[in-house]
Amino acid sequence: MILISEIGAKAAVLLNKSNFPFYHTLIPAQSLVYGFIFYYLFKSRGKGGIVALLIGFLFAVGSSIISFNVYEGKFSFPSLNLSILSILMIMGSLYLFYQILKKPSELSLFRIGDFWFASGNLLFWAGTFLIFGLYQWLLDAVHGHPSWMHHLIRILNYILYLTYLLSVYLNAENKPPKNDD
């Protein structure tokens, strides 16, 4: 999903000179994907799986409605949708931390894939919320795009990708072996 979104955003800039419409389509898709991921994570811990899936689906529908009605075809960035998705991801990550704490493991916290998934999401989406929540204020205060903003978003993306890879690796490593009887 991340690779597709990065390639799609670059292609949209080359073709349309703007990737704003692309991001208005990507955000509902992301909410569905994250809804399924959190469904799986929470279901395996016993609670909240169906709620996460329902929230992801409802937000995807709501985000699409907001994009086409509120913005009336004039896609702008950052959108209200990005701020709401950020808040939902922060809440989902915090709830995953809570679930990890409720069911202690013999493994070190740093050897648990879900910890890294939640950590990466918390850092990335909190940073995204702050940067794009303050976006207009930053533009007005600095009279244009501050150069550090793009660098910070890039660094946050790298952190997110790294924690996702670490999470996938640790989840595969910690998976119990199958019995072939």
Image (tube, rainbow, N blue to C red):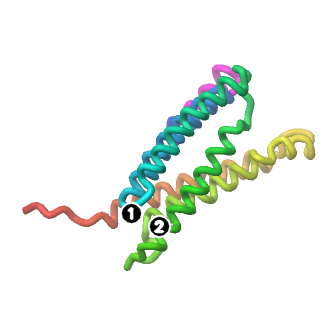
Which quadrant of the view contains residue 159?
Answer: bottom right
25 in magenta: no
Q: Which of 24 and 10 is in front in this view?
A: 24
Residue 99: mark in rendering? 2
- Residue 45 higher or lower than 102, as above or below: above
- Residue 75 higher or lower than 47, as above or below: above
Q: The disc labelled 2 sits on which kind of residue?
A: Gln
Outermost residue to the bottom? 106
Residue bearing mark 1: 45
Percent position of residue 29, x then y: 52, 35
17 in magenta: yes
Mark 1 Cα within 10 Å, few/some/many (few <14, many 20+)? some
Q: Give the range drawn in magenta.
A: 7-19
Mark 2 / mark 1, whichever is N-terminal = 1
Mark 2 Cα within 10 Å, few/some/many (few <14, many 20+)? some
Percent position of residue 4, x then y: 50, 35
Task: Give the SS element for disc 1.
Answer: helix
State how far apart marks 2 and 1 are (Cα): 7 Å
Q: Which of 52 and 27 is in front in this view?
A: 52
Query: Mark 2–mark 1 contact, CB under 8 Å?
Result: yes
